[in-house]
Image: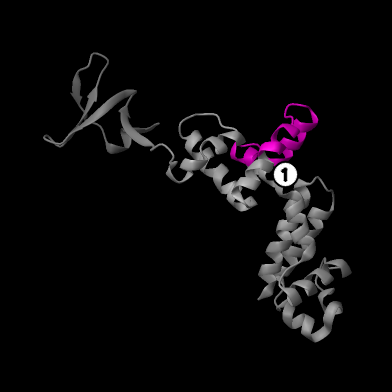
């Protein structure tokens, strides 16, 4: 069914419009996407039976949306969507960069309005990254790799960090997370010889652990 393919595009259009700060339209496209996902009949069949008027019977679908569905059915793409992706590319990269830092789009907008984040500061490196990577998807993938690598080491990172690490992106790996056992705040060790756990107290003494496995606290050590 084409319904899912077109619904995915409309969901993406909604997201891109939201990134661009356009009101009302994002929710309209989202409603149409949901309607298409719930529609029991393939839009291809609906269109063949009744043309644009049949498509307009889908909840939330007006003439403009119906024409876009028709365009996709005939050409396999929607010009408005392709143009919107190109227009929003830089903003999408900047938005994704902040998402990797735990900052949502809404928060990014609020902080930009308050001057806490100078948005224009990030557009030039985002544009340069887009040129270097060749696509929004590849730029976002590069940011993701750097973010995972840096976060696992408690390091800060900027979009410019991607340039510095560009030649080693394929080798960048998050630092291995190791879990170590503790009991009541004291570290533990496993004796392979005695097949027992021991607790090391503050004096450095090894005390045989007499508790239950559930009493052991496993802490993540980065």
- In this rendering, position of residue 217 left or right of residue 163: left
Disc 1 residue crowd, few under 14, some 14–19, many 20+, Cα 10 Å: some
Q: Position of residue 138 (x, y in %)?
A: 58, 51
The residue located at (88%, 70%) in the rendering is 63
Q: Residue furthest left?
A: 193
Quadrant for residue 162, please give it. Answer: top right
Find out whether residue 122 is within the magenta segment: yes
For the question of whether residue 17 can be seen, the reply is yes
Q: Which residues are magenta?
A: 97-125
Where does the C terminus fall, quadrant-wise?
top left
Where does the N terminus fall, quadrant-wise?
bottom right
Provide the residue designation for mark 1.
91
| Residue toward you, 51 or 201 | 51
The residue located at (65%, 36%) in the rendering is 103
- In this rendering, position of residue 166 left or right of residue 130: left
What secondary structure do most residues of the magenta stretch adopt? Answer: helix
| Residue toward you, 74 or 32 | 74
Q: Is 74 situated above or below 145?
A: below
Quadrant for residue 214, please give it. Answer: top left
Q: Residue furthest bottom?
A: 49
Q: Position of residue 150 (x, y in %)?
A: 50, 34
Q: Position of residue 67 (x, y in %)?
A: 84, 71
The residue located at (63%, 43%) in the rendering is 129
Q: Is 134 situated above or below 148?
A: below
- In this rendering, position of residue 193 left or right of residue 86: left
């Amino acid at each position: 069914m084409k319904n899912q393919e077109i619904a995915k595009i409309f969901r993406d259009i909604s997201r891109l419009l939201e990134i661009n700060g356009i009101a009302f339209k994002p929710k309209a496209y989202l409603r149409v996407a949901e309607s298409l996902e719930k529609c029991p009949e393939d839009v291809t069949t609906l269109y063949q039976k009744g043309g644009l008027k049949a498509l307009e019977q889908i909840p939330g679908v007006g003439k403009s949306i119906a024409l876009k569905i028709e365009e996709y059915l005939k050409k396999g793409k929607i010009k408005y969507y392709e143009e919107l992706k190109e227009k929003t590319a830089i903003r999408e990269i900047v938005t994704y960069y902040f998402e990797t830092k735990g900052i949502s789009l809404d928060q990014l907008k609020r902080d930009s309005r308050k001057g806490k984040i100078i948005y224009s500061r990030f557009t030039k490196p985002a544009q340069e990254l887009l040129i270097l990577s060749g696509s929004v998807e590849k730029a976002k993938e590069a940011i993701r790799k750097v973010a995972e690598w840096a976060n696992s080491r408690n390091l800060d990172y900027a979009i410019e960090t991607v340039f510095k690490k560009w030649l080693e992106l394929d080798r960048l790996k998050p630092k291995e997370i190791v879990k170590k056992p503790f009991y009541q705040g004291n570290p533990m060790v496993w004796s392979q010889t005695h097949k027992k756990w021991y607790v090391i107290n503050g004096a450095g003494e090894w005390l045989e652990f007499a508790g239950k496995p559930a009493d052991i606290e496993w802490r993540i050590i980065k």
